[in-house]
């Protein structure tokens, strides 16, 4: 392989790695960090009737969305942990089709348009759930009579 071709391949790989990083995904999605920290993160620690808290599975298992572990007695993440959570959770938002983002679809009941399976159960029975509305607001979509719109 020529030196020129090798350089092209190396640069292409490097650009792809940067573009796929959590920081790039989050930046590309233009998601509000402060809104995430103050409104979205509390949803992950909230006890929902008949459901485990999000942090129970998403801190221990190797899930697509990972949350930082809280220390014993800690009720909310510190700044460093919040930034890591933001990076991970931002990966579950699809800038190209925010309404179909994994963050919105995966924990939503299938009857409401969600995935067929979520090992943590159906955290949201409908798109009208106030916490689900917060997620929608952060992702940048609005409920629209039968579905989502940007």
Image (tube, rainbow, N blue to C red):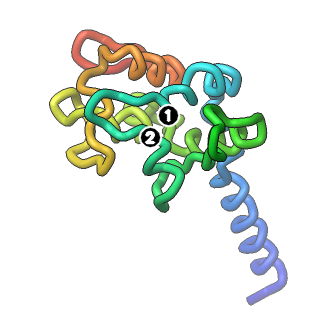
Query: Disc 2 designates what residue?
Result: 54
Disc 2 residue crowd, few under 14, some 14–19, many 20+, Cα 10 Å: many
Query: Disc 1 designates what residue?
Result: 44
Q: Are marks 2 and 1 in contact (CB under 8 Å)?
A: yes
Q: Is residue 112 above or below residue 10?
A: above
> What residue is rendered at 69% in x and 27% in y?
33
Quadrant including the N terminus: bottom right
Most extreme residue toward the bottom, as rendered? Answer: 1
Q: Image quadrant of residue 127?
A: top left
Residue 50 or residue 123, whichever sits in front:
50
Residue 9 or residue 21, whichever sits in front:
21
Residue 136: which numbered mark, if any?
none
- Compute the Cα span from label 2 to label 1: 5 Å
Q: Image quadrant of residue 23?
A: top right
**In the visual, does 139 lie left or right of 100?**
right
Q: Is residue 13 above or below residue 6?
A: above
> What residue is rendered at 29% in x and 47% in y?
118
Quadrant including the C terminus: top left
> Which circle's residue, 2 or 1, is located before the other in the chain?
1
> What residue is rendered at 64% in x and 39% in y?
73
**Tally of numbered discs:** 2
**In the visual, does 48 lie left or right of 145?**
right
Q: Residue 81 appears at what percent x and percent y?
A: 71, 42
> Disc 2 on helix, strand or loop?
helix
Q: Residue 108 appears at what percent x and percent y?
A: 29, 33
Q: Image quadrant of residue 145?
A: top left
């Amino acid at each position: 392989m020529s030196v020129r071709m090798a350089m092209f391949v190396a640069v292409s790989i490097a650009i792809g790695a940067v573009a796929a990083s959590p920081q790039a995904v989050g930046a590309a999605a233009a998601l509000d960090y402060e809104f995430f920290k103050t409104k979205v993160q509390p949803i992950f620690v909230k006890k929902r009737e008949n459901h485990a808290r999000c942090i129970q599975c998403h801190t221990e298992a190797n899930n697509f969305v990972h949350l930082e572990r809280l220390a014993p007695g800690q009720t909310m993440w510190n700044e460093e942990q919040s930034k890591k959570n933001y990076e991970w959770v931002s990966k579950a938002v699809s800038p190209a089709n925010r309404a179909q983002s994994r963050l919105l679809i995966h924990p939503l009941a299938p009857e409401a348009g969600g995935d067929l399976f979520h090992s943590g159960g159906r955290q949201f029975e409908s798109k009208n759930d106030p916490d689900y509305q917060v997620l929608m607001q952060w992702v940048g979509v609005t409920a629209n009579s039968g579905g989502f719109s940007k």
